[in-house]
Amino acid sequence: MSIEQQVEVLNALTQIMHDSAHGQYEEMCCEFEYEVYDGGWSVGSKYSFVRDGLTVSELLDDPEDRASSFVHKLHGLMKSHTGGDWKKFVLAIGPSGKANTKFIY
């Protein structure tokens, strides 16, 4: 069940990225950093998309900060499933619409 939950979380993050572009784009990418510290955790993000051949860097349009909760949930799911303790990951959607992830440990 964990793989399906991970896919659901990645789909939710992709939707936040899609909505943040406010219109058409050729591709988009977001690097999420996850940090655990004494008594808590934090998430940072670097988001960009390509529109009309130009790269646009913006903040995620996520006033409720749902992305941070999804990243935290994904980290927990993956750590319990594989033992992996990544510090950041990149979620990229290419021109074909295919999603790719890269986890950095």
Image (cartoon, grey):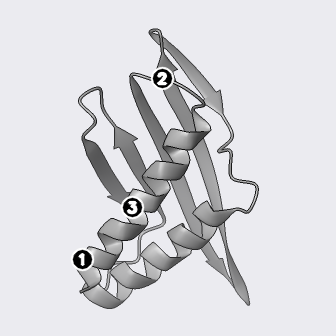
Residue at the spot 74% in from the left edge and 62% down from the top edge = 64
Secondary element under disc 2, as helix, strand or loop, is loop
Q: Quadrant of residue 43?
A: bottom right
Frontmost of labels 1 and 2 is 2
Alpha carbon separation for disc pair 1 and 2: 30 Å
Alpha carbon separation for disc pair 3 and 2: 20 Å
Which image quarter is the C terminus in? bottom left
Secondary element under disc 3, as helix, strand or loop, is helix
Residue at the spot 47% in from the left edge and 9% down from the top edge = 52
Q: Position of residue 102 (x, y in %)?
A: 32, 53
Q: Is residue 50 above or below residue 48?
A: above
Q: Residues within 10 Å of mark 2 (few under 14, many from 20)?
A: few
Q: What residue would you read off at disc 2?
A: 24
Q: Residues within 10 Å of mark 3 (few under 14, many from 20)?
A: some
Q: What residue would you read off at disc 1?
A: 3
Secondary element under disc 1, as helix, strand or loop, is helix
Query: Hey, what amino acid is under mark 2?
Result: Gln
Query: Hey, what amino acid is under mark 3?
Result: Leu
Q: Which mark is residue 10?
A: 3
Frontmost of labels 3 and 2 is 2
Q: Position of residue 15 (x, y in %)?
A: 47, 50
Residue at the spot 24% in from the left edge and 77% down from the top edge = 3
Front residue (pair 4, 100): 4
Q: Is residue 14 above or below residue 41?
A: above
First in residue order: circle 1 vs circle 2? 1
